[in-house]
Amino acid sequence: MQECNRCKAAGYPNQLIGFDKVGEDPETGKSRWKLIDENGMEHTHKFLQTSSPQQAQIQMSNSNKPIFKRRSVIDIVTITNIDEARTLFASGWEFYSSYPATIANIPHYVLVKRE
């Protein structure tokens, strides 16, 4: 069970949901899921009650948009010098990982640049 992000964004926190496998799409082969509440009933997203039906319709159409936007990775770089890493950090690169890649255990830093 996890918290429903759409209900949380609408001002209703702690709405726990789970996923129940309904079946598979015969054309694409992807699994189809439905949202279930803590009680095992089908989950319906909560939204703020508005005064007019037109505002409710606008809010429902906006609720189909994703809440969080994922930033995709544009470039990846591995470097051994910490001074180079610091300059890349200053220019907008993000730390991803580090590992000892050589016999002398000089760490290689893996940095990513996101969109």
Image: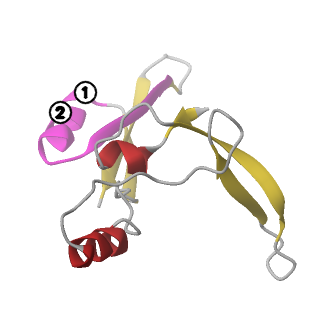
Q: Residue at x 56, y 19 (%)?
A: 103
Tell me if I can see residue 75 in this picture. Answer: yes
Q: Amino acid at mark 1?
A: Ile
33 left or right of 71 in image? right
Position in image of residue 112 (x %, y %)? 36, 47
Given residues 99 and 106, the one toward you in this image is: 99
Question: Quick one: SS at disc 1?
Answer: helix
Circle 1/circle 2 CB separation < 8 Å: yes
| Closest to the observer, 59 or 1 | 59
| The quadrant where residue 51 appears | bottom left
The structure's colour scheme is secondary structure
Q: Is residue 77 visible?
A: no
Q: Nearer the viewer, mark 1 or mark 2?
A: 2
104 sits left or right of 57 in the view: right
> Callout 2: few (<14), some (14-19), or many (20+) C-alpha neighbours within 10 Å?
few
Q: In the orientation shown, which residue stands out farthest toward the bottom?
A: 27
For the C terminus, which image quadrant?
bottom left
Q: Verify whether residue 87 appears in magenta.
A: yes
Which residue has dot 1 on it? 82
x and y percent of residue 49 in the render?
27, 56
Number of other residues with Cα within 10 Å of mark 1, as a class: few under 14, some 14 to 19, many 20 or more: few
Q: Is residue 80 magenta?
A: no
What number of labels is visible?
A: 2
Q: Observer-nearest residue: 67 or 89? A: 67
The image's mark for residue 86 is: 2
- In the rendered image of this protein, does residue 7 appear above or below residue 86? below
Q: Residue at the location (31% across, 52% down)? A: 113
Which region shows up in magenta? 81-99
Tell me residue 69's x, y (percent). Answer: 34, 58
Would you identify the image quadrant in which residue 29 lies?
A: bottom right
Residue 28 point in image, percent of width and height: 79, 78
